[in-house]
Amino acid sequence: MRKAVFYLCSVISFLTHGQGNAGLAEKHYEEGLKLYRSGDYQASLKELNRSLYLDATRIDAYLLRADVWEKANRKENALTDVETALLLQPDSRELTFRKGLLLFQLSRWEDALSTFQRVLRLPAGETHNLYYMQLPYRETTVAMLTTQSDIRSLIYTYLGLAAIQLNKCRDAIAWFDSAMLITKNSADLLVNRARAWADCGEPASAQSDLQQALQIDPGHALALHHLARLSGNDQQMEEQLTEVIRTDSLLPDAWLERANYRLGRNDYAGAEHDYSRALTYLFNNPEIWLNRGIARKHLNNWAGAYDDFSMALYLEEDFVKAWLERGNVLHQLKRFYESIEDYTAALSYDPDNPRAYFNRGLSWSKLEKWENACSDFLKAEQLHMTIPESLKKRCKKTDY
């Protein structure tokens, strides 16, 4: 009898402790939510961490913490929290959709594509849901109330955008067509499909869609922008991009393309500014980091250029251009052994790159390692690169 009473008391104690943890977890969650709404995201994060420590099954806490991570531009952390929530509710259409959005923002196109396709296979609910999501034609996050049919149209749109990134223009057109069956008279969808037509080498179809988009929305910035691009007039293109940015400063593609034009005409300060704005939205794009680094190099901002090339390599380890450019910066800074390491890394990914051999040879020559230098110059010449006569004459004195 005493054992039974002891056991019953133990169970009651356990349940009471569990209920106490749940209550405390709820308290920390509510405080985290309050802090989040006030804009104090760091304090909100601490409260949500405490809530999840006490109760690791709270989907609402994981999702709110994902919002906090997104505010801090730490989308990988946000993705982890959404994936954890999905483990607790694996067939949630809404959670799967949000996972797809984060994968899309992280430029993980294949993963985003398969995730959005999974959303289409999950059963649709009847409720309305508030989503914080990207607009389907730019990288801006907005809040919007969506029905299940709205979600389906957005899914088709994101599938099309991911397909464009994967160079599957025909698939993209098909996905945009599906979205248009649900969302009628959408200038945004017409602009998206125009981009796919252009990628498929059908400029007439692209122009037709852009003109239809402008009939719906005469001031549509992206439609005007893409029409200018199709015209092929560089001066008009830059002027149009400036007008697009003035109309809507949150379009990363406009900043990026104007940066490319400015870099091409040696406006390095303008290019650096525009690449910086583009990186606000396209943080995981190694090509943009590379190009901003090139602009900074021409501005003699060697430290900034080095950091940008390093970031490009962090995002894409086999990025040969970034290895070469960072090697050039190190050479300029007279850090010749380090520049040699970078040129060697470039050659490990592209063994027949004459520029890497030549530049490495220059670094060896600065160290008076002429045997190594001349060996690299010879290899560059064998790969059809012209070697200055002064270096050839110097190497004739060297036995290598």
Image (cartoon, rainbow, N blue to C red):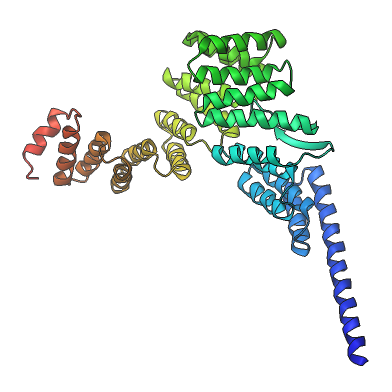
272 to the left or right of 134: left
Is 174 placed above or below 215 here? below
Q: Position of residue 16 (x, y in %)?
A: 89, 72
Look at the image and tell me whether residue 71 can be seen. no
Residue that appears at 39% across and 38% down: 322
Judging depth in this view, the residue of 266 and 65 nearest the camera is 65
If the image is split into quadrants, where does the C terminus sit? Answer: top left
Residue in the image at 9% along x and 33% along y: 393
Number of labels in the image equals 0
Left or right of 168, for residue 62: right
**Residue 378 image offset from top left, x and y in percent:** 15, 37
Vertical side of 219 occupied by 55: above or below: below
Q: Position of residue 255 (x, y in %)?
A: 56, 23
Question: Residue visible at 19% across and 41% down?
Answer: 365
Q: Quadrant of residue 11?
A: bottom right
* Residue 11 appears in view: yes
